[in-house]
Amino acid sequence: MLDFFTIFSKGGLVLWCFQGVRGPAATAPVNALIRSVLALGMGTAPLPQERGGNNSFTHEALTLKYKLDNQFELVFVVGFQKILTLTYVDKLIDDVHKEFRDKYRNEFQQKGALGLLNGTFDFKDDFMRLLRDAEESSKVRAPTVMKTFEQSLKSQKTVKCMIETRGEKPKEKVKNKKNKGSKKDGTEAVAAPSKASAGDKQLSAAGDKEELTKDEILQKNREEFFRRHMKAGEKSRSPKPDAQKEKGKKPRVWDLGNSNAKVLDYSNSATNGSAEACPVEEFDPDMALGDKNREPGRLYDLEYESDDEAEEEKVVQNPSKPSVKKGGLGGMFGMLKGLVGSKSLTREDMDPVLEKMKDHLIAKNVAAEIAVQLCESVAKKLEGKVMGTFTTVTSTVKQALQEALVQILQPQRRVDVLRDVMDAQRHRRPYVITFCGVNGVGKSTNLAKISFWLIENGFSVLIAACDTFRAGAVEQLRTHTRRLNALHPPESHGGRAMVQLYEKGYGKDAAGIAMEAISYARNQGFDVVLVDTAGRMQDNAPLMTALAKLIAVNAPDLVLFVGEALVGNEAVDQLVKFNKALADHSMAQTPRLIDGIVLTKFDTIDDKVGAAISMTYITSKPIVFVGTGQTYCDLRSLNAKAVVAALMKA
């Protein structure tokens, strides 16, 4: 049973309302729907509920389903108890929408806004009729009945077609083997039929078994020939004893390398960030920094150069474009007719354009499911809108899609790391950032880039080596620590090392190491703690449990998911399962989820930037950093317009 059904304008004027049960009015749930959903979706960006494709909203014990009418700026909302399963609600809201529009269409078109203020909408009888029809249609549906044997396709087969003639398939196999055999096989195949003919004379009285016996004899003779042939080959290839087999394993010595293995032995290096004990590494600073003209400490925006003239109208073309060959006044009037906005947009007009847009987004590495949902949401926003003068369907849809993509990439909550670090300084505690992600996406490398950026902004950094599983993970971070201290020596910062490494070796509990590192940073006065974790696949339950434990125990200020820009559909699966694992395995009542994204390897994808859309769409979390190269300066902030320009380029 329905609790209520209401029809109101987007300006907030209630046109008609139906109260199904006695109780509190529908004001509170409808206001919650407007604040949480409708107020966010007055533009062209997809609503949060529309991303799932259900147009439903839950408020306390009620489930609300809504439908928007963009032509007359109307909203249709139905509410019912969420414990009920009402299959006719979708049909009812569509029928009411159509009936209400058709009944009061002239009043809306002639009087406009005054028609809403002064009009009287007597819709109760029509609504009750539609409600009865919808309820009856749900009851009329009978359960599906299984087919009887007589109705199945198997009953139409005759007994003759189900009888297999024995011996036909072995004959075909023998013919195929004759064609594929070598020269020696051919000589044996000549001798085999003679033996088979002798067997035929002995078994001529066997009747129906004659063909079967012939095939068996042919098969046995062939198998025996192959058996003898293989034995002869094994005897001819007798292994030679290795008289000069060396014991043990010698390390490889490269021609241009150093033959002294002591240079590569860092096992005696001091731990817990003792930078003074680490050997000073000699390398080219220009190679590590890249751009010499950069401004120290500045995080540049991501740039993309787009040729607007070459890009314009290349993605899709208007299917209703008139032919130039018609010539004369007819061609000119046809062109004007295609440009002037004389009617409202319909789904049939937009479908060809949206189909090409969907294929274009998928080709640019946007996940297929998200591309479909995004085009569907744009279609719902534009359906019923009146086109402007001298605009085409293609340009209208493309403009709406661009605006939706920009709104998706612009976060609702901006993450300002420098501001948050200074706020933590005022409270005399370190600011903790945890990095997580799958294997091989560049967590340690981009952690070093972020460390360099923080150091250039005057903050001291402690790197916690919590990847105790991957071989070489600690040594990789130690190398980055030595290089960063060489670029920013302690002499330039009052004798204090700006970056140190806290590590306890391999095979230890990552959550315990992170807790000790945070305590060490608090005692030593470090500004930021960067926690490096082991890469793990999203389907590995034990490793995901360990990651949830590390985050729940240490409560970092920022949890960053590191993902590469090369992936398409995989990005959605990774983010969804990482968030789900953090929620399922967390011990807190309100689990800590991913706060932001670090998008790596952005310099390897040219204009296939769809992974940025997929990641922000599925989580509504901002992309905080973008990795664009191999030097410490190759770190950027996301520029939404630049990414959309690359995405829409033909």
Image (spheres, helix red, strand yellow):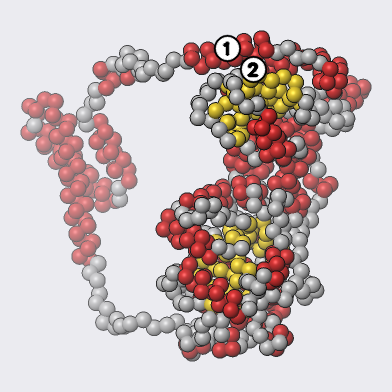
Residue 34 placement (x, y as % from top left): 70, 35
Residue for point 16% across, 38% down: 216
Residue in the foreground of this view, choosing between 32 and 49 = 32
Residue in the foreground of this view, choosing between 293 and 270 = 270
Q: What SS does tag 1 mark?
A: helix
- Quadrant containing the N terminus is top right
Badge 1: residue crowd in 10 Å (few <14, some 14–19, many ≥20): some
Residue 160, quarter of picture? top left
| Residue matched to label 1 | 133
Residue in the foreground of this view, choosing between 560 and 258 = 560
Tell me the kind of residue under disc 2. Asp
Does 232 sit left or right of 299 as displayed? left
- Quadrant containing the C terminus is top right
Q: How many marks?
A: 2
Residue contact at pointers 2 and 1, CB within 8 angstroms: yes
Q: Is residue 328 visible?
A: yes
**Of the image marks 2 and 1, the number of the one nearer the N terminus:** 2
Tell me the kind of residue under disc 1. Asp
Does residue 171 lie above or below 527 as drawn? above
Q: Label 2 vs label 1: CA separation?
A: 10 Å
Residue 153 placement (x, y as % from top left): 35, 18
Q: What SS does tag 2 mark?
A: helix
Residue 227 placement (x, y as % from top left): 19, 53
Residue for point 62% across, 27% down: 24
Farthest residue in the front direction?
23
